[in-house]
Image: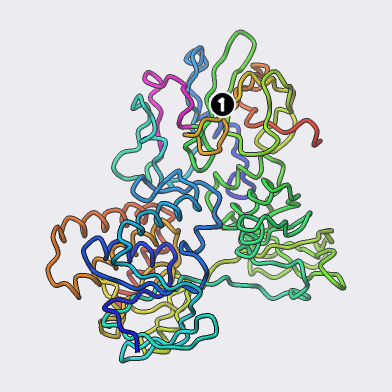
Amino acid sequence: MKKTPMLIIGGGPAGLSCAIQAASLGQSVTIVERSHSLGGQLVKQTHKFFGSEKQYASVRGFKIAELLIQEYEKYKDLIEVVLDATVTGLYPDKVCTIVQNGRYYKIKSEVIVVATGASEKFIAFENNDLPGIYGAGAVQTLMNQYGVLPGNKIVMVGSGNIGLIVSYQLMQAGVKVVSVLEAAPLIGGYLVHASKLRRLGVPIHTSKSILKANGSACVESIVIADLDDSWNPIPGTEETVEVDAVCVSVGLSPMHQLLSMVGARILFIPELGGWVPKVSECHETSVDNIFACGDLSGVEEASSAMVEGRLTGLFAARRLLGTIDNDESIHQDLISQLEGLRSGPFGKKTREGLLQMKEEGQC
Amino acid sequence: MLEKNGVPSKEQVISCFPESSILVKPKAIIECYQEIPCNPCETSCPFDAIKIGVDINTRPIVDTSLCTGCGICVTKCPGLAIIVASILNDKAIFKIPYEFLPSPKKDENWNALNREGNIISKGKILSVLDSRKQEKTKLITVEVSKEYLYDFITIGCPDER
């Protein structure tokens, strides 16, 4: 069985940042990544990021992935990257089972950081399995990574930041965005993103959602309707809209499955995205030497995931190395970056969620 | 209503502008209505004319006595929420961010759009800047009639409508 001192599951913004931080402190690590490249969702983000300089503000997402990969290359002799490898099991003796190109094997590690991210939520409506109905992640993968148009005339369901940003990217690709629908009474994402769409003539409708899709081989039209205060469709407001694609962007749920399997304590905290592992202030789960960070421990922007990854890299390296040079200053810097990202009105949900997690007692 | 449809009210727009007398020279106009954790406008300004401070959620404030209207912040803002405006005789001249193809060219007349996406007039393209530092956000200088000072926000390709 292969052995490594520190194993990171997931090479997205959190996992990759975690590896870089740990390696910069002299700790050797192994990253196991499901896809064929590092960077996670960053590689399909074509918009400029918010945040401050330390989180690569004003740099486009795919460029941030390139910068992180460049930084990783500085520590190439300390970071081993295993690509196209899916972790299928995690056991209390810190053994991971891995499937890579049809081969099944195990890795045992002293310390494990789980940074599996989050998966997209979907909503129930009639015919929601018709071809042409996508999640926002799939639209970005097709369009921004592979240059394939998902459709010509599309309705976006959901006005969070992802829904608004992907609508703008669809327009950049030449797709007609008919409208953005939001079931809640107010727009969910940053209003600057909403204004960017509106000034280009895309209507954003709040208290409105999709009821059903029509079509035989693929989606040909959809029925939308106004919603009342309890989010129920108001009879008589139904309207049919011709489209050849629908994009659903209604939030993310943390991918806690490996941590559930290993018996880590999982809490339901809607403010953090649903089922999340209980972590200590050092991002350690209830299982000794298994840590969690990024969207898995609370859905936020990638900027926060990168800082959390670095922070968890520090904690994990500390566990293995004992004392670390400049530990206190690195720690303080990362903590204050996270506080900066979370202290405004858009960080309220995360702050409340983290407080709930703290009040849930010791791991 | 901004929170429902993305369109700020006229009062909200005007609150982001300095007095017209100041706009004899170009100045940055920042339409950042929410406290978002973000500060590239402040850090990119070579003249220290934009103030956010230690808490990056604070809304930016432009010091028009220091702002030269250079337009660097316009292409740095990830929310495309900054334009530069100035008044010259009966014309309003804007520098706006633009991230679409085809690119406008100097001396072309494009559709001038308001914040609802309606065509309000024609806008004459005075220049197109696309340096490497702008990271693919073009800086377009557009001239419209002065009466559209608080209405104009972007341009639309004339072939599309």
Please say if B54 is above or below A75.
Answer: above
Please tell me which residue is depicted at 58% across the width and 48% down the height of the picture.
B3
Mark 1 Cα within 10 Å, few/some/many (few <14, many 20+)?
Answer: some
Residue B83 is drawn in which quadrant? Answer: top right
- Residue located beneath label 1 in the image: B129
Report the front residue among A212 and A307: A307
- Magenta region's main secondary structure? loop
Q: Is residue A117 left or right of residue A122?
A: left
Please tell me which residue is depicted at 80% across the width and 65% down the height of the picture.
A223
Please tell me which residue is depicted at 46% across the width and 70% down the height of the picture.
A117
Point out the stretch of residues depicted in magenta: B60-73
Q: Is residue B61 magenta?
A: yes
Q: Is residue A119 magenta?
A: no
Q: Chain of mark 1?
A: B
Tell me which amino acid carries mark 1: Leu
> Furthest-top residue in view?
B89
Please say if A271 is above or below A201.
Answer: below
Residue A320 is drawn in which quadrant? Answer: bottom left
